[in-house]
Image: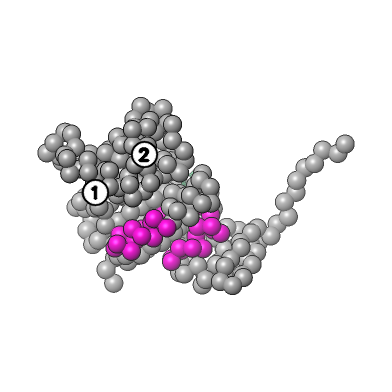
């Protein structure tokens, strides 16, 4: 198996907070996988560890068989959680996409004609061509996701890592983003994303990793979306309704809503 990502016995986290211990995980080249798990279980920390944005305490991480310091930065595209971005920064959609070019050594301090054309092609493909000159602050959540996706794709990466790429957008946009990612994966790009949405996102992915400070289980959604595995991942009792190959996953605990009595 050719691995796009290999974690071998990795212990990582923060100074006073080890998030996972002796984690081993292989993501083969060409896989389209989603990581699911409760808030604070370490999904973002795992992505940052894979990308070398997070120091590791022990173990090693290899991308396409190479240690992180030997990996060509342009071979990896990363879309961070958009909630962590300062939208007041005065940039246009086009400038956001071009920022993807400024990794590693550059011969020119400005984009070449070919790079500009590539920005325009990507913007066409992602449906944001008409808003290339708009200030990013004046765009919708779905348009921002696409702008950052274009930024991550500008160097034609072999590996695309996305932190919650479908959060904060409506279900139609979620579906469109997933569809786009499916097309990009069909072109040979390995994709690893995180999501909180089991029903509209994770259940449509070819491969899902249930995570809670470590890998609880992984596989195709139809195999791993079981009451037992989801309860081990999330705690509490989970109900799964299956109908003609579709899932509906819910928490079985009744929701107590406080209603003011007249
Ligand atoms: N900079 C930091 N310093 C110390 N601890 C941190 C830091 N960032 C995150 N943590 C802690 O590390 C743990 C894992 O956080 P992480 O953000 O990886 O979880 P997550 O699964 O991505 O959560 P969410 O689904 O809410 O985005 C949490 O306990 C969190 O409080």
Q: Is residue 143 visible?
A: yes
Q: Quadrant of the N terminus?
A: bottom left
Looking at the rendered image, the quarter that the C terminus falls into is: top right
Circle 2 residues within 10 Å: few <14, some 14–19, many ≥20: few
Q: Position of residue 193 (x, y in %)?
A: 41, 54
Question: Closer to the camera: disc 2 or disc 1?
Answer: 2
Q: Secondary structure at mark 2?
A: helix
Name the residue beneath numbered marker 1: 155
Farthest residue, direction front: 130
Residue 99 lies in magenta, yes or no?
Answer: no
Residue 200 located within the stretch drawn in magenta: yes
Q: Residue at x 53, y 51 (%)?
A: 171
Q: Does dot 1 land on a helix, a strand or a loop?
A: loop
Q: Is mark 2 within 8 Å of ligand 1?
A: no
* Left or right of 172 on screen, residue 249: right
Q: Residue at x 50, y 57 (%)?
A: 201
- Residue 104, quarter of picture: top left
Q: CA distance from mark 2 to mark 1?
A: 22 Å
Q: Residues within 10 Å of mark 1 (few under 14, many from 20)?
A: many
Part of the protein shown in magenta: 179-208
Name the mark on residue 130.
2
Residue beneath the point at 33% across and 33% down: 133
């Amino acid at each position: 198996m050719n691995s796009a990502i290999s974690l071998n016995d990795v212990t990582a986290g923060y100074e006073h907070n080890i998030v996972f211990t002796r984690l081993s995980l292989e993501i083969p080249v060409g896989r389209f996988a989603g990581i699911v798990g409760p808030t604070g279980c370490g999904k973002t920390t795992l992505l940052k560890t894979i990308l070398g944005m997070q120091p590791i305490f022990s173990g090693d991480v290899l991308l396409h068989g190479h240690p992180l310091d030997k990996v060509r930065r342009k071979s990896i595209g990363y879309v961070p959680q958009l909630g962590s971005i300062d939208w007041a920064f005065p940039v246009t959609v086009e400038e956001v996409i071009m920022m993807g070019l400024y990794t590693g050594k550059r011969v020119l301090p400005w984009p070449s004609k070919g790079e500009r054309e590539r920005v325009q092609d990507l913007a066409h493909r992602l449906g944001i061509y008409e808003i290339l000159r708009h200030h990013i602050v004046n765009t919708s959540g779905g348009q921002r996701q696409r702008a950052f996706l274009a930024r991550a794709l500008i160097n034609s990466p072999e590996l695309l890592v996305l932190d919650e790429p479908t959060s904060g957008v409506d279900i139609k946009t979620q579906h469109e983003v997933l569809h786009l990612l499916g097309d990009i994966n069909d072109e040979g790009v390995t994709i690893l994303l995180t999501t909180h949405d089991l029903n509209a996102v994770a259940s449509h992915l070819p491969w899902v990793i249930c995570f809670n400070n470590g890998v609880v289980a992984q596989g195709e959604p139809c195999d791993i979306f079981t009451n037992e595995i989801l309860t081990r991942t999330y705690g509490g009792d989970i109900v799964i309704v299956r109908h003609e190959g579709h899932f509906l996953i819910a928490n079985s605990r009744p929701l107590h809503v406080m209603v003011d009595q007249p």
